[in-house]
Structures are given as structure tokens and as C-alpha cells.
Amino acid sequence: MYSFFNGLVKIKESASHLKPSEQKVANYIINHPQEILDLSISKLAKVCKVSEATIIRMCRSLGFKGFKELKLNISASLSMNETLNTKYEDISELKYFTEVKHIVDFVTINNLKSIENTLSIIDYGAVEQAINILDSARKIDVYGVGASGVIAIDVEQKFARINRWCQAYPDNHGQLTSAAHLTDKDTVLAISYSGETQEVIDSIKIAKQNGAKIISLTKYGKSRITQMADVCLFASSLEKSIRSGAMASRIAQLNIIDIIYTGVASKNYEEAVKYLESTRKSIKNRK
Amino acid sequence: MYSFFNGLVKIKESASHLKPSEQKVANYIINHPQEILDLSISKLAKVCKVSEATIIRMCRSLGFKGFKELKLNISASLSMNETLNTKYEDISELKYFTEVKHIVDFVTINNLKSIENTLSIIDYGAVEQAINILDSARKIDVYGVGASGVIAIDVEQKFARINRWCQAYPDNHGQLTSAAHLTDKDTVLAISYSGETQEVIDSIKIAKQNGAKIISLTKYGKSRITQMADVCLFASSLEKSIRSGAMASRIAQLNIIDIIYTGVASKNYEEAVKYLESTRKSIKNRK
DNA sequence: CACCTTTATGAAGTTTTATTACATTATTTT
DNA sequence: AAAATAATGTAATAAAACTTCATAAAGGTG
């Protein structure tokens, strides 16, 4: 059975155990993987200055049935890398699009990439801490204005489903009022892409004075909010242009929210399933 | 440059435009992509009961140089799917997780997949229509309750950035009131994952009576809302368990929202850039 | 250090696979 | 129903992959 185990990686790993002339071929492949796909054995033999038989032998040494299988594997490897490495830059600006399909690709790639990038900078320790803090909180306040306010509301809804006391405050007045009443048993989830939103900063200052724990969710990097937070969560910061208005970062932030929500729910598995089930039923009956 | 149109998708898309005997081959490939990689032209011809020449012609019709290129492409497609397909089924239920990393993977893969799946069922024509309708609307009403209400608010914020009159109504009362005032120059964007939310149905009924256009955003498939809508947009319906509470579909819906928003913004490129710029400035000054 | 053994490589031939050119059959049009 | 056009298949050709066997290089042994 054909396996997708990254052909190129396999070659790189095993190259040193090959015979000298086989190594010549392996190295050529490592350096020109894309080109190989267009080359026949005889041409490749010529470029590498080895015989065709050597190439076949190399394929076998690497565990492939033959040259064809090697090529298929390399093609698969390349596509896998490509999938994960698409040039994010190329598409981060709003353009004048002539085709709907281009818009779809533009937006979708941005969103997919932002989730992937967020994943690449994730700090598992911080996620775990955040989950624990939220899990043991008496009340969870969620602060965020503008686009982050939408996320805050999403958090409130999610935690409501598993019967947690969680309230979103998308406006400064509500934030300040609530922060004033918090205790050391409570937690604030502060959402701000820039990490510099004044309203949120003012509010968590008060929350902190009252002993509440602060969890921040911002773009990657130091900011006034991260400096005040007990635990910092980050969403991809690669989005360059607010001009694009695409706000892919928001989707990455939601992904993080989903993660910590799932973490809390899973820590209380039995209970969570029960609540989710009754939430589901009560929504269904409304129809 | 990265393209979503990997070999298999290309085949699926174009299969219907092929000549009958070529279709036989295309269908076989779609159903047994993995197997193709091990088959020679003559063997494939035999299984499909067509001539070898037909196969070559099909490859050309699909835009490949020949059979070899097609095979390489399929191999690449499969690996790409594999990269993103990792055990989707296995993880669609909330579990008791022992490792934070498992939670992160669980949630992230679900979210990535839901965007991907949404893309695979996208109807470009409908997207284009939706963009045109929204672009020319005097006022845009966005209806959605619960989780969809959060999305509705997101839409409002997005369109506000490019200076469109767009209002979210996450509650039934507001929806009904606004619907009563709509005209045939207006558009309603109706968001409901199930497509059966009573509040939304009631509201768009009134909007329709007043001549407003209806665009729906629901899970894939027929529903009461889609039947009333002029244009139907769909987000992946693969999410099996409401129990998971992960609501990956929401992220897929946001992706669709981003797409139509970007479409409208791009149709008015100069203007949009201007508004986005002034939005950015005014937010910045607040800090 | 000459001889043998083992290992590595290449040249030429064989088989398989892909592709082309042309013939035949079906389908449409007038 | 005949002519024109499109679709498909057959058989020949070209190209590629793979095998076999010969030869050369390296390494060890009496």
C-alpha cells in the first residue's frame, strides 16, 4: 500500500547511507524536487552523471518500488509543504478582484493561514493555565470593544451553554461597573487585537485591584494589556493591513476561544454533556 | 502560487463537461483516486471499458499534459487532503482530554475542516449574486438569533467600516419592527444554522411582503429559510454533534461573511479603501 | 604485492507504459 | 436519408522504466 510518508523527508534522512553515486542523485533531488517531476530517468541520469540503473537502485534503497513511485511521493510531499507554507503576504491586501473565485480564495486562504499561524505560536502551558483559571472562576467577565466585542459575546454564549456565569461587556461603562464588583475568585478575559485598547486597560486595572485574575487575548507580542495579564494568549499577528478589513485575526481568536472553552468543558465532561444536552433540547423546542 | 484547484477538485468540477466515455474515466478516478496511482493507462482503460486514447484525451481536456501529469497531481491532491483530513470523524465529539495539545488539535482541525468543507460546496454564482444584491441595497438588515446573532453583529460592524447602512437585529422584536419598514430597495441577510429558526422565518416573511430581497446563510440543504430566500449561501453541514458545542460551523459562516464583505468592498475599491482608512484613523485616535 | 572477493557502477537490451495517427462508429444537421 | 461532425477505438510508434550482465573499483588475504 502506497504511503504518503513525506518522500522528501525520507530522502533527506537516508541520503547519507546511500552509495556515493546514489547520493549524487539524492542530493540533486533534495535541491531540485520540483524539477524532478518533469524529468525522465535518462535525463536525470544525464544531469547527475550516473547511470539509469543507479537511479533505480537508489529508489529501491529508499524503499520505493521504483522511480515512478518516488516521483508520486515527491509530488505529494511538495503539495503538503505548499499547503502549509502559502505566501501569506501575497494576499493580505484588498484588491480589485475580477473573479468571484479569486475573492473566495483570497479570503479563505487568509482565514486558514491565520488559524495555522496562531497554532504555530501557541503556548500550551498558557492555554492550560487559562483553562484552569476559567474553570475555577466564580464569575467570568469578558471585555472587548468593537470587533473584539463580538468575540466577547461569543464567549458569553459558549460558557452559558455549560452553565457558567460569564458575561460579556462590549461597552466601557458596563466594563467599569462590573470590574468594580469583582473579587479574587473572579476572572477577566480581556480581548483586544492591538493589546492597547484604552477602555479595556482602564477596566482591567480596576479588576486587578479587586484581586481578579486577568487572561488576555491579543495579537502576538508585548503590549500594555499583556503586561497587566496573569496569562497571555495570542492570535496570529501576521495580518498586516487593517485596510483589507478582512480581519482574519478574528477567526484565529475564535479558534483560541473554542480551545479554552473546549478545555473547560472537557474538564467537566459529565456535567458539560448534561448541560449541552439540555441547551440543545430547549433550543429545539423553540422551533 | 497556491491554488485550491488541486487535481481531484479540478476533475470533480469539470467531469460534467467531458464527453461520455471520458466521464466514465473521470468518475472512476473520483471514486478510486488512490488506486489510480498504481494503474497504467492500459489497465485503467480496461477497468473503465474505454480505449487508452480516450484516457489521454480526458487528461488533455482537464488541462493536463498527459496521464503522468494527472497522476502526479492526484498524488498531490491526496496528500493535501490527508494533511487537512486527519481523522475528522474521530474527533467530532467532545471527549475527556488528557492533554492540552489534544484539545488544541481537536478544535483547530475541526475549524479548519469546516472552512474547507464549506469551500467545497460553494456556489460561485450565488456568491456573486449575493454580492451584487448587497452592493446595491439601500439598507441591509441582518437577522439571526443566538449564535447566529453574534454573526449578525459581526456583519453590521464589517459593513459599517465601509459606510454601508447595515443593521443587525439579534432579537425577534427588533427584527419584526425593522422588517415592517423595509422596501424593495432593501435586503435582508438571514442567518440561521438550521435554516428553521422561527423568529427569522417570521421576520423575513414580512420583509418579503415589503419587496425586500432575501439572502440566506444556513447549513447546506433545503430548509424553510432557503425556500423563502432569493439567494442561498451555505456553510458546511458536516458538523455532527451539537453536543461538542464547538460550533465550527460558525467559523465557516464567518468565512462566507468575509467573502461577501470583501466582494462588496472590492466592487467599490477606491471608496472602500478611503472609508477603511478613515475608520482606522478614528479608532487609532481613541487610544 | 599479486590474487581473490566483494562492492559499486555503467552499457545495452527488454519490457512496460504513454502517446500518436488513423480508422471506425455514433450522432447531429440539413 | 445523406452528409457532416463528433466521439471513440485500434494499432503502430515513441518514450520511459526496469533488468541483466559485464566491468571497474575497493578492500582484504596469503
Image (cartoon, coloured by chain):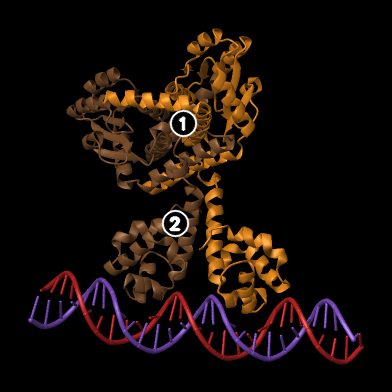
Chain colours: A orange, B brown, C red, D purple
Q: Residue at x 56, y 71 (%)?
A: A67
> Is residue B192 shown left or right of residue A256?
left
In the rendered image, the vertical position of residue A152 relative to residue C1, given as above or below: above
Between B211 and B266, the one nearer to me in the picture: B211
| Residue A149 percent across, percent down from the top left | 47, 22
Residue to which mark 2 is pinned: B6
User: Which comes before the other along the chain, label 2 or label 1?
Assistant: 2
Q: Contact, CB < 8 Å: mark 2 with mark 1?
A: no
Identify the secondary structure beneath mark 2.
loop
Between D21 and B67, the one nearer to me in the picture: D21
Please tell me the numbered disc located at residue A189.
none
Disc 1 packing (10 Å; few <14; some 14–19; many ≥20): many
| Residue A247 percent across, percent down from the top left | 48, 34
> Is residue B252 shown left or right of residue A16?
left
Q: Chain letter for mark 2, please.
A: B
Q: Residue at x 49, y 52 (%)?
A: B82
| Residue B188 percent across, percent down from the top left | 28, 30
Q: Chain letter for mark 1, please.
A: B
For the residue marked with disc 2, what is the amino acid? Answer: Asn
Q: Residue at x 52, y 65 (%)?
A: A72
In the rendered image, the vertical position of residue B218 relative to residue A48, given as above or below: above
Q: Is residue A195 visible?
A: no
For the residue marked with disc 1, what is the amino acid? Answer: Leu
Residue to which mark 1 is pinned: B276
Identify the secondary structure beneath mark 1.
helix
State which quadrant residue A136 falls in. top right
| Residue A271 percent across, percent down from the top left | 46, 24
Disc 2 packing (10 Å; few <14; some 14–19; many ≥20): some
